[in-house]
Image (cartoon, grey):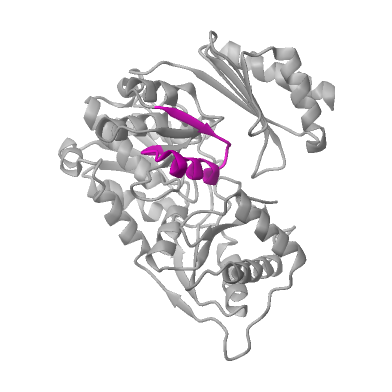
Amino acid sequence: MVSVSGIRGRVGDPLTPELVCGAAAAFGAFLLREGAEGPVVVGRDSRTSGPMLRAAAVAGFQSVGLDVVDVGIVPTPTVLMAVRHHGAAGGVAVTASHNPAEWNALKLVTAEGMFLDADASLRFRTYLRDEDPPRAAWDALGTLTRDDAAIDRHLDAILALPVLDVEAVRSARLSVALDCVRGAGGLIVPRLLEALGCEVAAIHTEADGRFPRDPEPTAASLAELGELVRESGAVVGLAVDPDVDRLSLVDESGAAVGEDLTLALAADVVLRRRPGPVVTNLSTSRVVADVAAEHDVSLVRAPVGEINVARRMQAENAVVGGEGNGGVILPMLHHTRDAPVAVALILQHLVDVGSALSGAVGRWPSYSIVKRKVDFDRSALEAAYRALAEDLDADADDHTDGLRLAWHDRRAWLHVRPSGTEPVVRLIAEAPEMDAAQALVDRAADILDGVA
């Protein structure tokens, strides 16, 4: 799959070292054609296929004459920060983020320290399809150097954020439970928690890629963390995905509170100190809008996809934003989802409100969100959208990213869109009651079945 999310597939079929080498060569040549200068940065998560595919990517870049800076096993946001630090032409994060262990991917980064937006992605895909990248001569091949300080710089930047009262968080001596799913988070989140004075009970901090659960940190995959929270007496449980750009939360009773609350609570911290616009995507809970309304600031929705949200944040001069999958973007640091930043903001929120997580969550309206993936022929999506709009009679519809229908009085919405990371169509609905949200998803699935 090639999209604004990068080049993604199952390892061995179709994602081979040969394909990755060729794709990296093409991306490097594309960056040079676009006028970029400097080296490229390569980092990876902990997947077992990472060393092989990282080596292939490095070879591809070197083959077109680009020097490579290898930052090792690091979070994806750390890679993006390293691109800016090194004045690089761009970079690649070798990671499939929340996908299962048999997947891997190249996340493509520009000199801005951001992923390719829709226009740049289209230009690159055209180049990838139509061009044969020019290779460097034997005496002009790229070099390879190592940067082992990328995580240190990332941590220092978080601890220096003006929206954090580091001393207040340290003084609170918060008890925290942590699940790093044996991804790259084990190399940064425990260090951050230690720096913030937390008492930590942690599982799966080994960065070996042997994921012990579904790497997507949804409620269904956090039972073990919930048990750890109860055993340790933690006030909050923290779970990250393998490349550490998403954070999910478990309250002190061991119950998962839903990924959307991560952005809502983090936004409250920022807006208390720096009021301004908030941007999120079309699939994010209404609770983020409730937080924005509490602070009397605007909430703007963008199509799903980190870069789509980030670009809209730039346009709106937003002070905070992100996605309802646990991805928080804090532009005073950078325009990318960053779970370590989210961790720091959540701890700050607990200190601000003086309670464990359930008390913090209880300050806001409660919604139920239901998510479902279905196999569906994408060529029939437009017909499906028409059928959905006709059958469900919503108050408002939005066609900027699939179809989003909303019912204002019911405080409910439904979003139907093709996934950018998996060969499925996603159905997401939210309402104050679980039954109402489930009924929307079920009805949408039935309508799609009828169209198919």
| Residue 439, placed above or below residue 209 | above
Q: Depth check: 446 or 89 in front?
A: 89
| Residue 60, placed above or below residue 189 | below
Number of marks: 0
Residue 249's quadrant in the figure? top left
> Quick check: can you spot residue 212?
no
Residue 7's quadrant in the figure? bottom right
Residue 84 lies in the magenta stretch: no
Give the residue at x 54% y 22%. 369
Apparent side of residue 164 relative to residue 445 in the rendered image (left or right):
left
**What is the x, y in percent for residue 19?**
70, 66
**What is the x, y in percent for residue 103?**
64, 52
Q: Depth check: 340 or 178 in front?
A: 340
For the magenta stretch, what is the residue range?
Answer: 298-320
Apparent side of residue 51 relative to residue 88 in the rendered image (left or right):
right
| Residue 297, placed above or below residue 215 | above
Give the residue at x 44% y 54%. 75
Residue 251's quadrant in the figure? top left
Q: Depth check: 372 or 219 in front?
A: 372
> Quick check: can you spot residue 413?
yes
Residue 314 lies in the magenta stretch: yes
**What is the x, y in percent for residue 229?**
35, 32
**What is the x, y in percent for residue 428?**
61, 26
Give the residue at x 54% y 81%. 142
